[in-house]
């Protein structure tokens, strides 16, 4: 095996590409060296360890590979993450924001939050698990302060409305990323109609929409929408 070539992504800080034997993959620098969270490959390079980030396992990675122009997850950011599941993407978001950032990870499934705590939080100081329903943000407003960005992947109908409810946490000019699955919203409508409706809901809620990126071939009938809360 040839020595890996590691470069920071040309647009996004603390997100990397790792090239081995001509194969380029996305990665983040492991904040907990030696620990693989969901079986992802670990690559050593010049004293740092990188975790391969698979776009088939993470919609955020799929959006980056498919050319999203804005990723509101940056070193030092405070992120409200809605729909944390067992922490696959949360673990990479935690790597990107690093030790000075914070991830508030909201999840309503007891089983998933247990796995999130076991797999991720136990090894990370910057991920706070919150067992709650993202439709009732008042339940966690004592824990979550102002955040720089919201990442929303709850695979539920009316995601854009749910995001708007949580925008009370977003600082002025804060940014959001929302993964929309057309079949979670309305199986009787075409995916493009569903996506347009969600974008419209976001605009009506005061967001300026930047990207609507399709996630094929990694996820079928999904888009990632990025937007900024107008101040
Ligand atoms: C598609 S999965 C998330 C995958 C995860 N974002 C990742 O990339 O690793 C959606 C998750 O949202 C959670 N969820 C759905 N509705 C929710 C709600 N109203 N409040 C909190 N969590 C919710 C589900 O239990 C599920 O774990």
Image (tube, grey):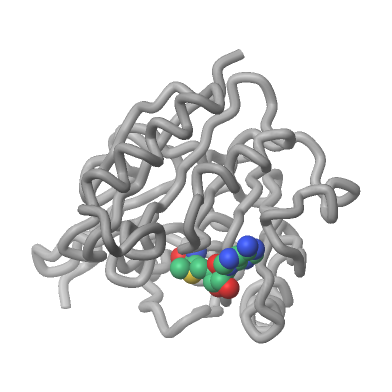
93, above or below 22, in the image: above
171, above or below 149, in the image: above
Image location (x, y in percent) of residue 189: 26, 54
Image location (x, y in percent) of residue 58: 38, 65
Q: Nearer the viewer, residue 59 or 202?
A: 202
Image location (x, y in percent) of residue 71: 42, 39
Q: Residue furthest right?
A: 142
Q: Nearer the viewer, residue 13 or 181?
A: 181
Q: Residue at x 84, y 55 (%)?
A: 139
Q: Residue at x 32, y 57 (%)?
A: 182
Q: Nearer the viewer, residue 162 or 179?
A: 162
Q: Residue at x 42, y 68 (%)?
A: 51
**In which image quadrant can residue 123 be found?**
bottom right
158, above or below 204, in the image: below
Q: Nearer the viewer, residue 131 or 13?
A: 131
Within the displayed image, which quadrant is ligand 1 positioned in?
bottom right
């Amino acid at each position: 095996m040839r020595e890996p070539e590691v470069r920071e992504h040309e647009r996004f800080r603390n997100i990397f590409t790792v090239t081995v034997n001509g194969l380029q993959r996305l990665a983040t620098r492991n904040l907990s060296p030696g620990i693989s969270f969901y079986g992802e490959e670990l690559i050593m390079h010049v004293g740092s360890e990188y975790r391969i980030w698979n776009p088939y396992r993470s919609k955020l990675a799929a959006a980056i590979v498919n050319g999203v122009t804005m990723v509101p997850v940056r070193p030092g950011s405070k992120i409200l993450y809605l729909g944390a599941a067992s922490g696959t993407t949360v673990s990479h978001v935690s790597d990107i924001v690093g030790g000075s950032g914070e991830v508030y990870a909201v999840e309503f499934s007891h089983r998933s939050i247990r796995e999130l705590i076991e797999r991720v939080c136990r090894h990370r100081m910057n991920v706070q698990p919150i067992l709650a329903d993202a439709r009732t943000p008042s339940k966690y407003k004592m824990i979550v302060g102002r955040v720089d960005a919201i990442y929303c992947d709850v695979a539920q109908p009316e995601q854009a409305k749910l995001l708007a409810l949580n925008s009370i946490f977003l600082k002025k000019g804060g940014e959001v990323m929302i993964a929309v699955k057309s079949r979670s919203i309305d199986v009787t409508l075409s995916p493009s109609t569903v996506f347009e409706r969600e974008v419209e809901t976001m605009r009506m809620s005061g967001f300026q929409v930047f990207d609507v990126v399709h996630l094929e071939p990694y996820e079928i009938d999904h888009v990632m929408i990025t937007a900024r809360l107008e101040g």
